[in-house]
Image: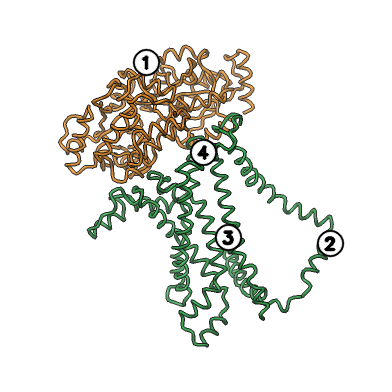
Amino acid sequence: MLLTACGSDAGGNGGSSDGDGVTITWWHNSNNEPGLGYYQQVAEDFMADNPGVTIEISAMQHEDMGTKLDAAMQSGDMPDIFMERGGGEMADKIDAGLIRDLTDDAAETIEKLGGSVAGWTLDGRTYALPFSIGVVGFWYNTALFEEAGITDTPTTMDELFETIDALKAAGIDPISVGAGEGWPAAHYWYYFALRECSEEALNTAVSSLQFDDPCFIRAGEALEELIAAEPFNPGFLSTPAQAGATSASGLLATGKVAMELAGHWEPGVMQGLTDDGQGLGENTGWFPFPTTPTGEGDPTAALGGGDAWALSGDAPDEALEFIEYLLSDEVQQGFAENDMGLPTNPAAVDSISDPALAGLLEVRDSAPYVQLYLDTAFGQAVGGAMNDEIALLFAGQATAQDVVDAIEQAAGTAG
Amino acid sequence: MADGATRAPSAVATAAAAGPAQETVRTPRTDPPAGPAAAAARRRGISWRQRLEIAVLVAPALVLMVVFVAWPVLRAVQWSFFTWKGYGPLVDFVGLANYVSILTNDVFHGAVRHNLFVVVASIVLQLPLGLAIALLLNRPMYGQGVLRTIVFVPYVLAEVIAGVVWFQLLQPRYGVIDAWLERFGLSGPAQGWLGTPELALYAVMIVLTWKYLGMAVILMLAGLQGIPHDVTEAAEIDGASWWQTQWRITIPLLGPTMRTWAFLSMIGSLQLFDMVWILTRGGPANATTTMATFLLTEGQRRANYGIASAASVVLFVIALVMALTYQRFILSRDNTVDSPRRGKR
């Protein structure tokens, strides 16, 4: 810690080329191969090119990292480089001076990443460099769809209802959802909001936290209509998202349901939940969220989010150099070849080998805009209240109006 | 190994010695009458050396108490008056707003109701069951030791492990319980035992009873060992049946044990967290929230540390008031019970 503090002073004096005795701490969540080994190699390459710089890596399981990061933020004893999801959560940290402003110091990299940095930009200043951005959509079991006689994936809500009926007729539970944890259920509401609301209405609501536009009520009503069709797995109100064979991901991975709404992480999660480590294997399919008949949003807009590298407020310039190196063509290509995520550097887009992820990347890059997960965008306090209210809507204990009211109440913008 | 083997019998010996020791307290006629006076003399005679000794011996415990109990409690009280995200300085003083917010929050009301339900249901279910099993296991019978162990096993199991096992047993359709029901042509609730808001709290309560019944049984059994045989023998000689002996002699003499157990059960119920978190996370639709899950959700997951702190203060006050009330009106009977009896003798 002392060394880091010294390094920060040296960096402040304008010297970034000589990294005499600088130790950088780096926390990431690639705690499994191939990611673990790849990042180790990347750090060693950087240290070889920059004598005197030592990178201390802590690779942690995702949830553990979140908990430790919260504690680190509270104590002020933070790692120099950490993962940041952007949105309202990041805004709180900026207010507390815990994140370094990268706008001027990393201008070149930020320009290369283009629109991807939007989720980590506040009032024209960019605070983190996104290295992986994914989109949410329906993952489905192609074998079960075939068994139910479904030849085309649904593109509209009407077609989705037909698909649900066909699956039910074949004795297959159509969709699993981990409503027990809130956010997987909430993703439905976000997507309906994305379909029902114009980009302008959505942006206004996200920045002002006022939801006067009737499209948000329509989003809730569309969700109520879906829930009324009873497409979800038995016990979905208490189903966890990803933990174990009876979680929403587990039910899809083991062929107990036909589809699930989830992000780019899903194939990886499913691989961990099956004995053979294959997940759904070659039966893995993906289709985007269907469109609604009254929607004002762009039908190809996507809901998504990602991870970015951020620096603590007092991180040394060597740490900045390192995260720029992480976003370089070379490292991002390796990142893509190892299927560690969906790279943001355009030069790495062609390097991805997994066909399902390559398909997602196409959807992401052809989307006119990628809306950040609304709970992340709103921050934990408002996002948590919103997710809980949406979970109540799934239980039939809240209305479309209640969801909007709960968000405005938590944000203090009601009235 | 050898160390453990020698230690075990000595522990039994201490426990056995505790029985007769109680007897001598209950019949203090032979005690030296100058108890209080002697104590006063001792107090006057305390030297600086002895005071230093006391200070040195007490200090480590006191320091731990201050650092890990008193200080966090005071910090929680302080945080409860601020809006605070968990980092940065405490600047946004809001007075009692956090308290107003939780006391008008339906979810928190629900949490308090669920806690009180568990307090009452635990005692109503586990006291008669625990007592009955203890009385049965206290009779000489074949396999007594094995049965006692079996009853106690759930309590020894780690709460998280027991929770995960029950979570899987209670899964809709694929869970063992639903599979059994199906074999008899029945079917569980469509959303599962833990997924149906109307049933979830009862399902949790049954798991809690399974988990903690062993604790009640073992305490009652220990209490039964403390009841002198001569009393029950005398009753038998007077022609009392087994039922009458239990009802008129054993159960009344077991009073202090039952009251202590109920106290522990009540405190445990108020702090209930692990089992609920693993089985339902407070859901479905907030049907099984407790005060502890509420404050974790607000604090850790929503970063509303001010609100979470206010909730923890409210939980602390509720637990303290209930504990003191219980001690004052119920446990106090056990402290004074000897004096009138002594007078009669």
Q: Which residue was labeled with disc 3?
A: B326
Report, in whole angstroms, how far the alpha carbon at label 2 lies from the one at label 3.
36 Å
2 or 3: mark nearer the eye: 3
Disc number for residue A408: none
Quadrant assignment for the N terminus of chain A: top right
Q: Which residue was labeled with disc 1?
A: A347
Circle 1: residue type: Ala
Report, in whole angstroms, how far the alpha carbon at label 1 lies from the one at label 4.
51 Å
Residue B42 versus residue A133 in the image, above or below: below
Instruction: Please report whichever mark, 4 or 3, sits nearer to the chain's N-terminal start.
Output: 4
> Which secondary structure lies at badge 1?
helix
- The residue sitting at the front extreme is A415
Q: Mark 3 belongs to which subunit?
A: B
Instruction: Please report whichever mark, 2 or 3, sits nearer to the chain's N-terminal start.
Output: 2
| x and y percentages locating residue B96 in the rendered image | 58, 38
Circle 4: residue type: Ser
Q: Which residue was labeled with disc 4?
A: B101
Task: Work out whether residue A299 or residue B93 is closer to the camera in this orientation and state it.
Answer: B93
Label 3 CA crowd tier, 10 Å (few <14, some 14–19, many 20+): some
Quadrant assignment for the C terminus of chain A: top left
Dot 3 and dot 1 residues touching (CB under 8 Å): no
